[in-house]
Amino acid sequence: MAVSGFEGFEKRLELQFFGDEPAILTNMGLRQLEFESLEQVLHAVQCTVVSAVGNPYFDAYVLSESSLFVYPTKIIIKTCGTTQLLKSIRPLLHKARHLGLTLCSCRYTRGSFIFPMAQPFPHTSFKEEVIYLEESLPSNLCYRKASVMPSKISSHSWHVFTASDEARTLISPHVPDVFYTLEICMTELDRVLARKFFKRPGDDKTGDTAGKEMTQLTGIGDINPGALICDFAFDPCGYSMNGVIDGDRYSTIHVTPEDGYSYASFECVGSIYDNHDDVARVLKKVVQVFRPATMSVSTTCTSHEVWTKVATALEPLGLKCRSCTMDEFPAAGNVVFQTFTTRRK
């Protein structure tokens, strides 16, 4: 293991708002924020926008360190490296307030950092992150829970913090969310496949052009056929992609291919009413692109045991389920954390 290197494991923040202003009724809300306002928020996090795409439902931004998704009443920021993600909360709440929006729920998740000692405040430990979250969130988010979900693999555990207001907490168990979120973290990528995410020496292609080539060369374009893909290749290596799927769904991939601390992540949103084979099909293609030796899958869903399909899909691919942990969070629903390794490990 390298003594130090680029931190692939992301921090992910999801903030949900409510409001009855005309802007919400016209389906704009947070999407009204000017680009300069988003840049100010990202400056606090210490990252920038490198590419963007949108549809009638939301806007997706590829960042210098991962991704940003902006919906009318929801914002998702996912950042890697030594970014200070939680410093986005206060400026976002301030800007949302000016749009007549009030925060009703927060969810923060991350895996276990490869290089924890390199992380700046407030990400020096999960305890510090929780303290910072508690101090940054408004008092109406009174239902709060923090948990570290363990596994039998010491390098993989799942950190979850949720907070919600009374209305969302009381209503959500009776009005189940039909959507689920899969957050997948992969380490020890196949070396030959990981080399495809390096730019060739002397290659003067732009990040956009090189990113499109990587999407096709690696098979990433086949994971969600028909998706509108916004991709970017970094210099000398690394790759990020946002896929805009049907309506308000997205998928996102980020790759740190350096040997010794190689890492890739895949995240997507699906519906419990989708074809039951969709989860298996997507997982199979993701594994084929990266062939990781170790893989963790976090499934968040309020109403359906989507997680049972995960092991069924991965085990025929040579990945054995080593652990499975479940916990329940206010308003967020059940979070199931599973870890897998190749059978040779």
Image (tube, rainbow, N blue to C red):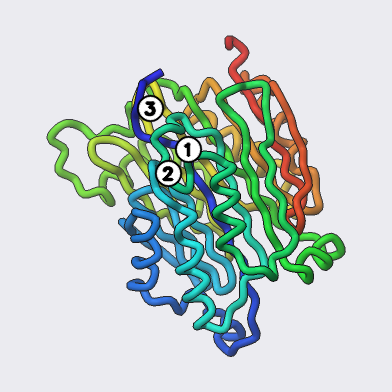
Instruction: Report how far apart the C-alphas of labels 3 and 2 lie in the structure.
Output: 18 Å
Viewer-proximal residue among 59 and 312: 59
Instruction: Report how far apart the C-alphas of labels 3 and 1 lie in the structure.
Output: 16 Å
First-in-chain label (3 vs 1): 1
Tell me what residue is drawn at x 80 percent, y 48 percent. Answer: 304
From the image, tell me which residue sits under label 2. 80
Extreme residue toward the right, this view: 174
User: Where's residue 334, x and y in %?
Assistant: 76, 47
The relative height of residue 132 versus residue 33 in the rendered view (above or below) is above
From the image, tell me which residue sits under label 1. 9
Viewer-proximal residue among 131 and 65: 131
Q: How many marks?
A: 3
User: Where's residue 106, x and y in %?
Assistant: 63, 60
Q: Helix, strand or loop at disc 2?
A: loop
Instruction: Report how far apart the C-alphas of labels 2 and 1 lie in the structure.
Output: 6 Å
First-in-chain label (3 vs 2): 2
Q: Helix, strand or loop at disc 1?
A: loop
From the image, tell me which residue sits under label 3. 194
Viewer-proximal residue among 155 and 69: 155
Viewer-proximal residue among 102 and 279: 102
Q: Amino acid at mark 2?
A: Cys
Q: Helix, strand or loop at disc 3?
A: helix
The reply to whether callout 2 and callout 1 are in contact (CB within 8 Å) is: yes
| Image quarter in which the C terminus is found | top right
User: Where's residue 341, x and y in %?
Assistant: 60, 20
Quarter of the image holding residue 296? Answer: top right
